[in-house]
Amino acid sequence: MGNYVERTWDSIEVGESASFTKTVTETDLVMMAGISGDFNPMHVDEDYASKTQFGGRIAHGVLSCTFISAVLGTKLPGPGCIYGGQEVSFRAPICIGDTVSAVATVEEKFTKKDGKLKFLKIKTEVIIDKAVRIPDNTGKVATTGYATILMLK
Amino acid sequence: MGNYVERTWDSIEVGESASFTKTVTETDLVMMAGISGDFNPMHVDEDYASKTQFGGRIAHGVLSCTFISAVLGTKLPGPGCIYGGQEVSFRAPICIGDTVSAVATVEEKFTKKDGKLKFLKIKTEVIIDKAVRIPDNTGKVATTGYATILMLK
Amino acid sequence: MGNYVERTWDSIEVGESASFTKTVTETDLVMMAGISGDFNPMHVDEDYASKTQFGGRIAHGVLSCTFISAVLGTKLPGPGCIYGGQEVSFRAPICIGDTVSAVATVEEKFTKKDGKLKFLKIKTEVIIDKAVRIPDNTGKVATTGYATILMLK
Amino acid sequence: MGNYVERTWDSIEVGESASFTKTVTETDLVMMAGISGDFNPMHVDEDYASKTQFGGRIAHGVLSCTFISAVLGTKLPGPGCIYGGQEVSFRAPICIGDTVSAVATVEEKFTKKDGKLKFLKIKTEVIIDKAVRIPDNTGKVATTGYATILMLK
């Protein structure tokens, strides 16, 4: 059977951080549209998108959320917990060719039901490490918000 | 050029609703893992997942968010607006074979900066129309929350 | 910029091990055929495959190699080294629905050119954790061999 | 039923050769990462990869193995035999945009168990026909090694 490290609530410290980095490609936009059904022209119609204020196709906002899911689901806290909720604000567009990092940082540990349910509040940001089509976006926060995680151990 | 209906803030009424429905397949889980990098074993390791309280692989929570993105991005309000933010709670697991509907319902219209910026607050739910592996989940709300949309017209 | 842990040759010990686990799906076979061009009927023609000694479609042998690549490229040793070579024997077929683990275990550390080039010899096995269509294959080694890795640090 | 030519061991001559050619695209890298779980930054993080000695993302070594699988599985010897094993050395990086050919050449025919098991030893090379990002790599051997094939007829 798969050999997974399952973190405990006790072992996790406020301030602990992890990240996942990937270059966003045209393929990601095409496949995201195909899975989701979100064929909004900003993501799949270059002719339309090039005439908007963004100057070309931009990634689905929710694509950045999938990278948050990756860092939470594989690194911090990783396997063995339940993703309770997420809030995000979309601040800057991610373009094809941009390299982005989803960064998760534990902000708070709390419990409910007399300590029986153990939670983490995790700050989740997607940062544009390197923006290609709109170079000024390098370093900007594309997506910011918080995740709520229920720990099972 | 593509022929898109771009809704105006004025034309949209509180209570207006739209939906997007899809059966979630194993392919969706495989591709979601592949795009996002989220290879959490709950989504890709049936041997592991079958031994958890969920009894088998479940969809990434964020997959349900992509269906919300679809209904917002293609139907209500559709092209020509900006997805400002989203908050979601994950309430019930979506399994392979389940048919789900993302439902968007306009809850509130508001403005900022003396009426210059026009927003919609949209209730967003993903409902399990038909649950296959866990039949009791039929009719349950898998994901619930709110989207904030900035209208450009 | 992405935050990666790059292991050094000195830090790695003989006997160290890591694994990557995934359920093999029909989607993987379809996509592997699509990327590679390997449309051998054993992988894409169920009618043909069902009449062979394997009783149905089996995964491309090279799919198991991609899981070896995953454990080497992301876990042991992970980023910052060069994949010099691989030898594999294909011992048992992997079927759709099987859950498999690629396991990498450091077997030997060696150098070339008066110690200037530092290498790892890593035993690489893909084990069938749970076989679905041919239950007797549970626990069998599907693929076995060795990887040679050039460490850059 | 599918109409396949299944070669016999007797019909195959030492020196016989076949090839499969394809241009490697960014999509191939994205999908290879997605199937395999190998998100090593050399393959998916352009910002990181551009700062290495390779100057940008390179294809997974195992992607070249999938092209070997294609030529073996569809052309020489094609359907009706068993892929027993493969050894490869990775010699030169394949970049996005490069056109490569996997070439299989029968090097030796041999038998085991008093002639009951009939094998081919096939030299397998992946050659860079046209290198785009690193033009000097045109004509280089990216991957070289040998395949062992068990013939069923």
Image (cartoon, coloured by chain):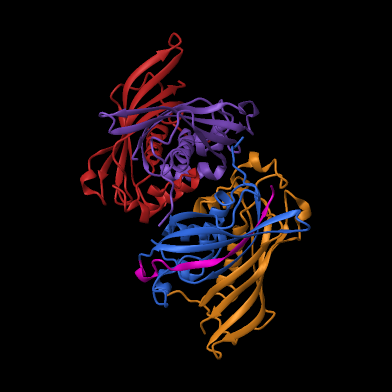
Chain colours: A purple, B red, C blue, D orange
Is C145 in the magenta? yes
Q: Examine the rendering and report whether any part of residue B2 can be seen.
A: no
Q: How many marks?
A: 0
Q: Position of residue A138 (x, y in %)?
A: 62, 28
Task: Say above or below: B121 vs D71.
Answer: above
Depth check, front residue: B104 or D128: D128
Q: At 30% from the left edge and 30% from the top edge, which residue is drawn?
A: B17
Is B106 in the magenta? no
Depth check, front residue: A46 or D114: D114
The magenta segment: C133-153
B98 sits to left or right of D42: left
Q: Position of residue C113 (x, y in %)?
A: 78, 58
Q: Examine the rendering and report whether any part of residue C133 can be seen.
A: yes
Q: Position of residue B48 (x, y in %)?
A: 37, 53
Q: At 26% from the left edge and 28% from the top edge, which residue is drawn?
A: A114
Task: Say above or below: A96 vs D7.
Answer: above
Depth check, front residue: C69 or D16: C69
Task: Say above or below: D116 vs B4.
Answer: below
Outermost residue on the bottom side: it is D114
D117 sits to left or right of A36: right
Res D92 quadrant in image: bottom right
> In what quadrant of the picture does the C terminus of chain B appear?
top left
Outermost residue on the top side: it is B114
Outermost residue on the left side: it is B136
Q: Position of residue B59 (x, y in %)?
A: 36, 45
